[in-house]
Image (cartoon, rainbow, N blue to C red):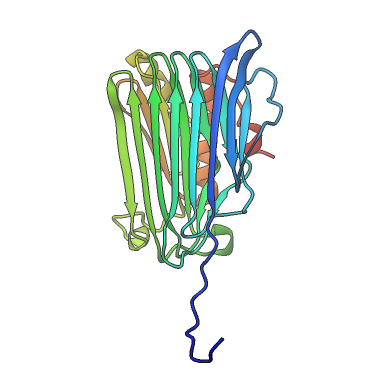
Amino acid sequence: MPRDTPIQPGRHQRSDGAFELGFATSARGTVLRHLFQQAPLRILFPDPEPGEPPTAALLNCAGGLAGGDALRQAVTLEAGAQATLSTAAAEKIYRSLGPETRIETRLSLGAGAWLEWLPQETILFDGARMDRRMRAELAPGARLLAAEMLVFGRAARGETMATGSVFDAWRLHGPDGLLWADALALDPASLAAPFGFAGAEALATLLLAAPGEADATLTGWRDLLRGLPEYAPGAMTIPRPGLLLARWLGRATAVRRAAGAAIVALRAAALGQPPRLPRLWTT
């Protein structure tokens, strides 16, 4: 090679992971109908606890995500199917050299189906850049219990997210059209601002969608959450018929504990499940 040949910058290897997961009903109850997975994503199927539906454990074999990585996730439940999906551990979004980490999730629930979408927390390292979007579609009689938790920095190491960016959007469609839309566009400067996040380490969102459910029932579920111990500052509301929303903001361990208690209460009251967290949250 001639000495005057310019050195070309190296290209960083990027992850492009995906999975498609489909459940249907049979004489044996809910069964796996379709599975596609692309590294670094893997789906494992631990034996469910007695009385619980099939459980899918999402595992990122790469150990975390960096800038430029992309994930595409899709879950489909046919009419009457029931399933729980969680992650094997917290997801980590590492400091980016410029590009965003992109995560796209699609959930589709047939008539009378219900899904628990309960991944563990996403830890945003200082300098992380994440663009995450979720779209869910519910047929008549379907129910969705969904939770997401963001941790702004590695709390155990005393790290805060001082640089980077977050865009986190939800779109939820019911039988009659758009049921709920929400987006968080976060500049780390707002994390310390007194009229922003006021130094909170974490934010958790819990959503229960039950289109067509009676208002009195939703009110009872909301009051159930309001009666739980206040592990972290939070609020519960019914923004529109058929939708219950709860959020907590505070220290990471306290927010996780508050969200966990609410998940236990709602999965028992609204889905008829045993009053406990999914096993992946406790092992």
Residue 232, relative to residue 44: is it above or below? Answer: below
Instruction: Single out the residue that lies furthest toward the top.
Output: 27
Q: Is residue 203 visible?
A: no
Tell me where residue 241 sits by quadrant. top left
Q: Quadrant of the N terminus?
A: bottom right
Residue 16 position, x and y percent, is: 52, 50
Residue at point 46%, 13% (across, down)? 112
Residue 159 position, x and y percent, is: 51, 64
The number of numbered discs placed on residues in the rendered structure image is 0
| Nearer-the-camera pick, 226 or 58 | 58
| Nearer-the-camera pick, 248 or 174 | 174
Q: Is residue 56 visible?
A: yes
Residue at point 31%, 58% (across, down)? 194
Residue 9 position, x and y percent, is: 49, 76
**Is 47 on the left-hand or right-hand side of 11?**
right
Residue at point 64%, 7% (across, down)? 27
Residue 69 position, x and y percent, is: 49, 55
Q: Quadrant of the C terminus?
A: top right
| Nearer-the-camera pick, 74 or 46 | 74
